[in-house]
Image (cartoon, rainbow, N blue to C red):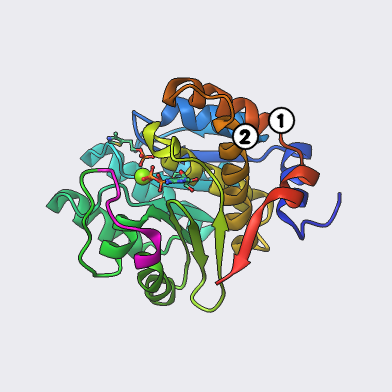
């Protein structure tokens, strides 16, 4: 197997040996997220029941947890899975969808943060609020620019000892010490529901492929979304055709093209 030092090499390694990714995501995202992982080369499994989520996390190579359509039973499954992943030393990714909206979500996210996610991926409003700032988010949608979330992301990464990815027009990734920005994507992406949730699952897939370089894995997932988003926007008539073009664009990208076209810069 080639060394996994670039986003493209990680993509090729994932396709060579598709990782089993345990996704606890929401009802809205389940189908598109599974298709995004398949198009990228990973093997998704959407498993959320409290009775089996802990056991399943022991089988999978990485876990992703998303609170988009939360219930007490789902939360029990998330906690069991996060504990199992953490105790097995497997990476797990948290997507704190609209965590600022209700007391139930705020408490759920506090419980999950205590279980030490290795990576946190959210939009700018979610990351600002998670770091303790005033966010302007409305429901699941961000109303803050990523630039305004960069300091929050750095603080959150230091506090949680985690990698934090903030997405939007220009994405930002930090582990508290290092930071990069990733350009690309399309204005049509926030017009298609659950693309952010799908990206969180894809971060899990890259983390499963390159657990020795979780920062690089996070960047690789965001970079393939950025490049495939640009490709899908060419010729898309609107959000509907963008959505299926995006899956095709993910599947069509190879490692060499990803490395040649990813626009990643040190922040
Ligand atoms: N204005 C934009 N221009 C280009 N890409 C965008 C834009 N807004 C979001 N994206 C991309 O859409 C994907 C989902 O991010 P985002 O919309 O921030 O997440 P969420 O759906 O959780 O709110 C990411 O790949 C991000 O880079
Ligand atoms: C619309 C909606 N409602 C609850 S979860 C969800 C999907 C949110 O997806 P994303 O965070 O990727 O925009
Ligand atoms: Mg989201």
- Other-residue count near label 2 (Cα within 10 Å), few / some / many at <14 / 14–19 / ≥20: many
Q: Is residue 39 left or right of residue 154?
A: right
Q: Is residue 184 left or right of residue 77?
A: right
Q: Is residue 266 above or below residue 6?
A: below
Measured as percent of width and height from the top left, residue 30 is found at 42, 29
Write the residue at 24% across / 70% down: 132
Earlier residue among tags 1 and 2: 2
Measured as percent of width and height from the top left, residue 194 is found at 40, 35
Measured as percent of width and height from the top left, residue 112 is found at 33, 57
Residue named by callout 2: 231
Is the residue under label 2 in contact with that under label 1 (CB below 8 Å)?
yes
Q: CA distance from mark 1 to mark 2?
A: 10 Å
* Quadrant location, ligand no. 1: top left
Q: Most extreme residue toward the right, as rendered?
A: 1
Write the residue at 71% across / 36% down: 253
- Inspect the magenta stretch and tell me whether residue 47 lies in it: no
- Other-residue count near label 1 (Cα within 10 Å), few / some / many at <14 / 14–19 / ≥20: few
Residue named by callout 1: 252
User: Closer to the camera, 47 or 192?
Assistant: 192
Write the residue at 64% across / 30% down: 249
- Magenta residues span 140-148
User: Closer to the camera, 31 or 148?
Assistant: 148
């Amino acid at each position: 197997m080639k060394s996994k030092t670039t986003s493209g090499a990680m993509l090729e390694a994932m396709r060579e040996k598709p990782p089993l990714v345990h996704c606890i995501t929401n009802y809205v995202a389940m189908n598109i997220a599974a298709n995004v992982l398949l198009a990228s080369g990973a093997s998704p499994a959407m498993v959320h029941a409290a009775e089996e989520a802990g056991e399943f996390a022991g089988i999978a190579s990485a876990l992703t947890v998303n609170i988009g359509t939360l219930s007490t039973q789902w939360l029990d499954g998330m906690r069991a899975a996060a504990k199992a992943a953490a105790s097995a030393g497997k990476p797990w990714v948290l997507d704190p969808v609209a965590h600022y909206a209700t007391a139930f979500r705020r408490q759920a996210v506090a419980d999950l943060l205590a279980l030490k996610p290795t990576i946190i991926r959210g939009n700018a409003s979610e990351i600002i609020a998670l770091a303790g700032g005033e966010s302007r988010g409305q429901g699941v949608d961000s109303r803050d620019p990523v630039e305004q979330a960069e300091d929050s992301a750095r603080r959150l990464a230091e506090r949680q000892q985690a990698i934090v990815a903030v997405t939007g027009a220009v994405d930002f990734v930090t582990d508290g010490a290092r930071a990069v920005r990733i350009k690309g994507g399309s204005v049509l992406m926030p017009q298609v529901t659950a693309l952010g949730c799908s990206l969180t699952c894809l971060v899990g897939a890259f983390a499963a492929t390159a657990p020795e370089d979780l920062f690089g894995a996070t960047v690789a997932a965001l970079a393939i979304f950025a490049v495939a988003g640009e490709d899908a926007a060419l010729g898309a008539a609107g959000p509907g055709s963008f959505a299926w073009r995006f899956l095709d664009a993910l599947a069509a990208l190879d490692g060499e093209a990803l490395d040649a076209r990813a626009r990643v810069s040190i922040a």
